[in-house]
Amino acid sequence: MADVSGMKVLAPANRYRGELPKVGIRPTIDGRLGGVRESLEKQTMEMAKSAAKLISENLRHPNGMPVECVIADTTIGGVAEAAACADKFRRENVGVSLTVTPCWCYGSETMDMDPAVPKAVWGFNGTERPGAVYLAAVLAAHNQKGLPAFGIYGREVQDLDDRSVPADVREKLLQFVRAGLAVAWMKGKSYLSMGSTSMGIAGSIVKDEFFQNYLGMRNESVDMSEFARRVEEGIFDKEEYERALAWTKKNCKEGPDDNPAGKQHDRKRKDWEWEYSVKMALIARDLMVGNPKLAELGFGEEALGHNAIAAGFQGQRQWTDHFPNGDFMETMLNTSFDWNGIRAPYIFATENDSLNGISMLFGHLLTGTAQIFSDVRTFWSPEAVKRVTGKTLSGTAAGGLIHLINSGSTSLDGTGQATRDGKPVMKPYWELTPEEAGRMLDATLFRPGDLGYFRGGGYSTDFLTRGGMPVTMSRINLVAGLGPVIQIAEGFTVDLEENVHGVLDQRTNPTWPTTWFAPKLTGTGPFKDVYSVMAGWGANHGAISYGHVGADLITLASMLRIPVNMHNVEPERIYRPSAWGMFGMDPEGSDYRACANFGPIYG
């Protein structure tokens, strides 16, 4: 049993340079003094306060810190007050803009003109004042000026003195802010390539233009020899290393070695591989976000890190043909805890697949949870399962399954050993308990690496994800002449009978973690059946996030101007800027045309 005694939930912390992004609330008003404006001041400002209260009480940043809202110092009745608000928002690091009003206002004079900040307008649905008229007018101004904005308008009429936020308004407000904060979080951060292209995988051919123009991120890179240098020169916190190694030996169970007996590494070599793997985890984290301890040790430059909100490790083959693989490092960084305690996961892509890394980042920023990185390995039809196991698939799996499996980067959260109301879940780290972390460790074996793949050895993570979890698989792909597109598949993890899983697992690599995935089917197009989902997937990897968050991903993609080429999200959950409706009546074609028309948010 894992020893979780003394494990604590670490206090929320900002790992990155600069302040956390805030949500700016802009209360706009009819600027006519002499009775009109004065009668609306209280109601308008109260509407802003209600929105701020809703957001701050229901959302957290992915690092666990509360989301702060900044309200304009005054209501905004014209250009001068709009400019004063913009100045305040710049000083306060506002990354998301929400305009609220119960009344008519002067549209182009009061609107937010910052092209790089996601924006929405909530027009109060009341009969006394024309909030809906302003909403329509200002959205038209946004569309005409090429500054897409989301419109929010409640379905039911509210009374003048009603300060509540209706359920449908609440849903759109939170969906908009979640996605907007994800945009703000990425801006100015880095993706760190540790190594370069892995085995010709296109996703590890890192494209600066995508990161810079669509995400507002920079690209950093180090050669994998930096790991060897830091190990050999002792550029890591040795006290933490000793603590981490002891914790690992106590809690990370080494599984059986499936390599041929004559080729297995001896015990001395395996122990060295454990030591090296732990050092790699420390070094990769320090490369991403820095470590003040290194400055105390005389390594001031190394102490700074690369301000990386996501990273990837090439590994194969230039590294893994000689050194221990990166599986342990990738697993522990992606997990919501380590030897220091329970903390926010790092986003770390195997094989330096930057596009899957960013897909994982999207899921993490929207949910606060750790992410699963997997090969989209095999479609198992019911007929094929029956043929090789003699068993009939049923329930959620009746139409077949996709076998998600990869050598290392799947977080231990992916075991599904955390629970809520007795059901398996993946939680934000601040909800995780030490007991749940212990169950994740108990459900995992660290298997000596397959020496056919990893000649240098190392340890691969091996577990089986519990079934019954709602999850969303996504993937960004780059297409010549088109740019980035994103595909989204909501579905469920599935439990198989032990003997069925065993037979299927043995046909691939049983030393790696498995997630059995059944996508939701629509009966048409790429979601006609499970085979069509597998056949339509655009790359060899997928990022899997807890929950059915496809709608949030679509909202986020529209902010970044990344069209969605494949999804199974119900139409009533899809929320895009008002301008998207001007590009035709076919929603997905309109998405492509709108994204092409407006272009990437930063480029």
Image (cartoon, rainbow, N blue to C red):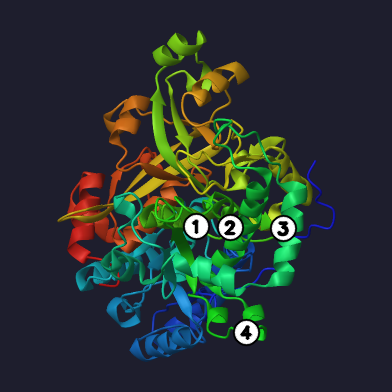
What is the distance, in whole Å, between disc 3 and disc 4 at their CAs?
A: 22 Å
What residue do we see at 55% from left, 60% from top?
Answer: 346
Labels 2 & 1 near each other (Cβ < 8 A): yes
Foreground of the two, 47 or 161 = 47
Which amino acid is tagged 3?
Answer: Leu
Labels 2 & 4 near each other (Cβ < 8 A): no
Marker disc for residue 245:
3
Q: Is residue 460 above or below residue 422?
A: below
Q: Earlier in the sequence, mark 2 or mark 4?
A: 4
What is the distance, in whole Å, between disc 1 and disc 4 at their CAs?
A: 24 Å
Q: Earlier in the sequence, mark 1 or mark 4?
A: 4
Q: Secondary structure at mark 1?
A: strand
Query: Which residue is under mark 2?
Result: 333
Q: Is residue 280 left or right of residue 530?
A: right
Q: Residues within 10 Å of mark 2 (few under 14, many from 20)?
A: many
Marker disc for residue 295:
4
Which amino acid is tagged 4?
Answer: Ala
Q: Is residue 461 above or below residue 340?
A: above
Say whether residue 307 is visible: yes
Q: Earlier in the sequence, mark 3 or mark 4?
A: 3
Q: Is residue 76 above or below residue 328?
A: below
Q: Is residue 568 left or right of residue 428?
A: left
Say whether residue 10 is visible: no
Query: Which residue is under mark 1?
Result: 348
Labels 3 & 2 near each other (Cβ < 8 A): no
Foreground of the two, 4 or 244 = 244
What is the distance, in whole Å, between disc 2 and disc 1 at their CAs?
A: 7 Å
Q: Is residue 587 above or below residue 247?
A: above
